[in-house]
Image: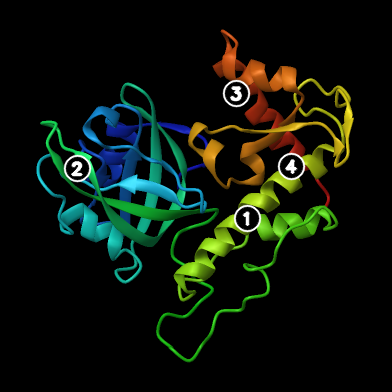
Amino acid sequence: MFEIGRIYHRRSEIHGIYKGQQYGGIATPAEHPYIFIFTGDAGDEYGYIDDFDPNGTFKYTGEGQKGDMKMTKGNLAIHNHQRNNKEILLFESTSRGFVRFLGYCNYVFHHIEERPDRNGEVRDAIVFHLDIVNEKGIDTAQTLTSKLVKAPKAVYITKSNKGKSLQQLREIALSSTPIQASTQEKIQSIQNRSIAIKLYTKKRANGICEGCEETAPFETKSGPYLEVHHLTRLADGGADLPQNVIALCPTCHRRAHYSLKYLEFNNKLIDKVADIEAGLKL
């Protein structure tokens, strides 16, 4: 229903269709199996700091403006989303009223840490660790009704290396972590996907900048020098999808971040990657 990387008007295209709270970071529409969560830079001064953990999970700050956060309402909805068959959809603010869809999420674990509330008072904040997945958050491949069925481990714990084929790296990058896996196995899966997507992007480029289409500027011990650029800002810290990453020479990479028309350039790169992915024969 939502396309990863595309921008939507929050009020009309999300709440106008699915309802749910129009303000705040977590929306839980009563009549649909979705939980919409929103992130951005606006809440940093109030302790709402969302970013990637070194283990690859996305750290999302729970709701509650004053005093200690409680595991109720939207926070409880995130914590219990798998049990309640709800999908978590993550959006990133881009401009006033507009958000970009970043993907579906699965709850991995949470921790409590001290952060300021809206009044500047120190309080206990709930920080969720989420796995941003490439498909819908509910793992339909695994049955939740039978405790005797164990998740196959071959794909999601497979480690990546340069010797793997483009297809093998893609499979690892797109692998889903089974809901029934342990927390440590889920984290290992996330880390493996993060490594795989970087190796996949460079192998796909085959020594050619996917921006300007010029040969990589020089060779290194590990091959042609190209930098992996994430087309969604939040993904700079963690795993991503094949259609959201591109291998660029240093000049194109800096253009994508710092040029006056960087948004226009990034939109062109999004279209270019879509064409590249569509033309692959794997």
Residue kind at label 2, given as amino acid type: Gln
Kindly report which numbered mark, 1 or 3, lies closer to the viewer in this rendering.
1
Q: Earlier in the sequence, mark 1 or mark 3?
A: 1
Q: Residue at horizontal 58%, vertical 10%?
A: 261
**C-alpha distance separating marks 3 and 4:** 18 Å
* Label 2 secondary element: loop
Left or right position of 80 against 146:
left
In the picture of the structure, the residue carrying the numbered disc 1 is 193
Residue kind at label 1, given as amino acid type: Arg
The label on residue 201 is 4
In the rendered structure, are the residues bearing label 1 and label 4 in contact, judged by CB atoms less than 8 Å apart? no
Q: Residue at horizontal 88%, vertical 39%?
A: 221
209, 3: nearer the viewer? 209
**C-alpha distance separating marks 2 and 1:** 33 Å
In the picture of the structure, the residue carrying the numbered disc 2 is 21
Q: Earlier in the sequence, mark 2 or mark 3?
A: 2
In the rendered structure, are the residues bearing label 2 and label 1 in contact, judged by CB atoms less than 8 Å apart? no
Give residue 198's position: percent from left, percent from top. Answer: 70, 44
In the rendered structure, are the residues bearing label 2 and label 4 in contact, judged by CB atoms less than 8 Å apart? no
142, 150: nearer the viewer? 150
Kindly report which numbered mark, 2 or 4, lies closer to the viewer in this rendering.
4
In the rendered structure, are the residues bearing label 3 and label 4 in contact, judged by CB atoms less than 8 Å apart? no
In the rendered structure, are the residues bearing label 2 and label 3 in contact, judged by CB atoms less than 8 Å apart? no
Q: Residues within 10 Å of mark 3 (few under 14, many from 20)?
A: few
